[in-house]
């Protein structure tokens, strides 16, 4: 099979109704199956990062895992904290009664996976992907601290939460002044790829056997019969009705089989197709859970699915044994799915498909032309600026007090961005800049005690998105409020009004 070949649909059950490509009006979405978390703004960490580095192994007997880490890094010996828990480029010497101080920390928690991975366990979630790690359900979350915990407000943290039968393993890193955060997240991703456990994976959802008889020859089906090896592509043990999705070979086809409570659904199978890098189909999950899944080319490090009413779902594809592809599955219904996108590790869209696996596009009518609306008579007061990751585009929301937005001019600009009034040059990172000029608008009351209605930062980092680098306040002068959006290139955009929110969407690079 070609290195870029994935598969063309051969049989995946009856298709549901088509879903449109109209975006949800909510500015913030989550790269996870759930609708409750928010997601936002440099490219979020994905697998396959950076150059290959030599690794060394260590074992944490107390937590029951082994992991590989860079051979020019150090880990703790185990006299104060359990061995193989702390990892850093410099020697790690934890002290009694102090919080561990290391670039990467592994921690075995008695908190359930459901609680450890819930939105309440994090600050402001910027991106969230489901994954399978050592045959276990896992999530990777990039979030921004609120200041209520150990981290200062605004500090970025990257966390893996991995399911265990009686708790969760949590591996994390966060911004530190002496280290490059992006590089450290890449190290953590590679360590997770080399994580293993002493105990077998939990069996809430037993894997299916290739012949469909519901029996297995061992934990998660490692037999090598004529149909080949089976790979656990996805586990959702924390669902109300747990299920697993297994990749099996059937003749010349690769199939995904969902299994729950000892039963298995009909397989969804695909035949090799050298021209296809991503496949999508409905999965038949016993018990009625809606799910979609498919296979992806090795170069696709992330799958995002845009859904109708349930935000954006993300998944890190799993390598399939004895096949040059990766498998993926998400617990969302085919009828809820608007489009599915395969991304490279640097955040570029490679393939966009609809829920039936047919080629489609994201925001097909948008372009780079300026957009504008006439100024309002009264001053509209800014209260918040948010950004969010969606499947295929990034969204910036300017939120105002009241029931409408001010007039606006939104356009790409050449040359430096200058502060109105002073002419001072305002630095904006990125290869292109979108200037958002809003009139009449301000972040401060013009009467009474001149209340500051916008109290957020003047510069919001672009972490967790694919197109946006940062969002910067340029000026608030004589009824004109100006912000700049740094972008990695001059990508198509659109402007929308949702009540008192002014929305700017920027399509992801291809």
Image (cartoon, grey):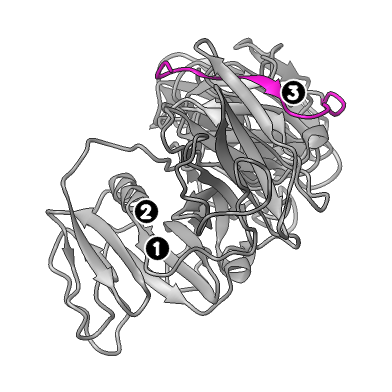
Secondary structure of the residue carrying numbered label 3: loop
Residue 284 sits in quarter: top right
Q: Residue at x 45, y 34 (%)?
A: 301
Point out the stretch of residues depicted in magenta: 1-19
**In the picture provided, is 491 more to the left or to the right than 213?**
left
Secondary structure of the residue carrying numbered label 1: strand
Neighbor class of circle 3 (other Cα within 10 Å; few <14, some 14-19, many 20+) is many
Q: In the rendering, at what x and y percent does residue 496 appear?
A: 75, 27
Q: Say which of 197 and 97 sits in front.
A: 197
* Distance in Å between CA atoms under marks 1 and 2: 8 Å
Mark sitting earlier along the chain (1/2)? 1
Residue 360 in the image: above or below residue 214: above
Q: Which residue is mark 2?
A: 192
Majority SS type along the magenta span: loop
Q: Residue at x 85, y 29 (%)?
A: 16
Q: Which residue is mark 1?
A: 171
| Residue 356, label in figure | 3
Q: In the rendering, at what x and y percent does residue 373 appear?
A: 77, 20
């Amino acid at each position: 099979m070609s290195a870029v070949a994935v598969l063309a649909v051969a049989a995946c059950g009856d298709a549901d109704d088509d879903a449109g490509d109209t975006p949800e009006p909510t500015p913030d979405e989550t790269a996870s199956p759930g609708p409750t978390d928010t997601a936002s703004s440099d490219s979020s960490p994905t697998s396959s990062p950076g150059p290959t580095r030599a690794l060394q192994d260590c074992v944490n007997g107390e937590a029951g895992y082994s992991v590989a880490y860079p051979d020019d890094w150090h880990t703790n010996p185990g006299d104060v904290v359990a061995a193989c828990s702390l990892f850093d480029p410099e020697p790690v010497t934890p002290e009694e009664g102090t919080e561990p101080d290391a670039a990467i920390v592994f921690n075995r928690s008695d908190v359930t996976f459901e609680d450890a991975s819930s939105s309440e366990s994090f600050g402001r979630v910027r991106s969230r992907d489901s994954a399978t790690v050592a045959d276990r359900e896992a999530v990777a979350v990039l979030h921004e601290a609120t200041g209520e915990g150990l981290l200062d407000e605004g500090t970025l943290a990257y966390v893996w939460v991995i399911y265990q039968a009686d708790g969760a393993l949590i591996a994390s890193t966060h911004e530190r002044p002496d280290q490059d955060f992006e590089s450290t997240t890449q190290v953590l991703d590679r360590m997770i790829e080399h994580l293993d456990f002493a105990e077998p994976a939990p069996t809430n959802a037993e894997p299916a056997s290739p012949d469909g008889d519901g029996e297995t020859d061992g934990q998660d089906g490692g037999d090598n019969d004529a149909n080949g090896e089976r790979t656990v592509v996805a586990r959702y043990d924390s669902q109300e009705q747990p299920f697993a999705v297994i990749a099996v070979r059937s003749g010349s086809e690769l199939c995904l089989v969902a299994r729950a409570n000892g039963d298995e659904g009909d397989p969804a199978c695909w035949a090799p197709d050298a021209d296809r890098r991503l496949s999508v189909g409905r999965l038949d999950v016993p018990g009625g859970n809606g799910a979609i899944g498919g296979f992806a080319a090795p170069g696709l490090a992330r799958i995002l699915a845009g859904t109708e009413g349930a935000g954006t779902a993300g998944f890190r594809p799993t390598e399939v044994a004895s096949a040059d592809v990766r498998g993926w599955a998400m617990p969302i219904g085919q009828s809820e799915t608007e489009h599915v996108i395969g991304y490279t590790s640097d955040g570029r869209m490679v393939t966009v498909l609809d829920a039936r696996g047919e080629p489609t596009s994201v925001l097909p009518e948008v372009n780079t032309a300026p957009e504008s609306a006439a100024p309002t008579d009264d001053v509209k007061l800014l209260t918040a600026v948010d950004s969010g990751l969606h499947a295929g585009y990034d969204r910036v929301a300017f939120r105002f007090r009241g029931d409408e937005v001010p007039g606006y001019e939104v356009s790409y600009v050449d040359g430096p961005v200058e502060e109105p009034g002073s002419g001072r040059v305002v630095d904006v990172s990125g290869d292109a800049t979108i200037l958002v000029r809003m009139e009449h608008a301000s972040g401060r009351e013009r009467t009474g005690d001149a209340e500051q209605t916008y109290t957020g930062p003047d510069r919001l980092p672009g972490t967790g998105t694919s197109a946006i680098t940062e969002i910067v306040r340029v000026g608030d002068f004589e009824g004109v409020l100006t912000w700049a959006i740094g972008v990695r290139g001059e990508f198509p955009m659109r402007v929308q009004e949702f009540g008192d929110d002014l929305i700017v969407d920027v399509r992801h690079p291809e």
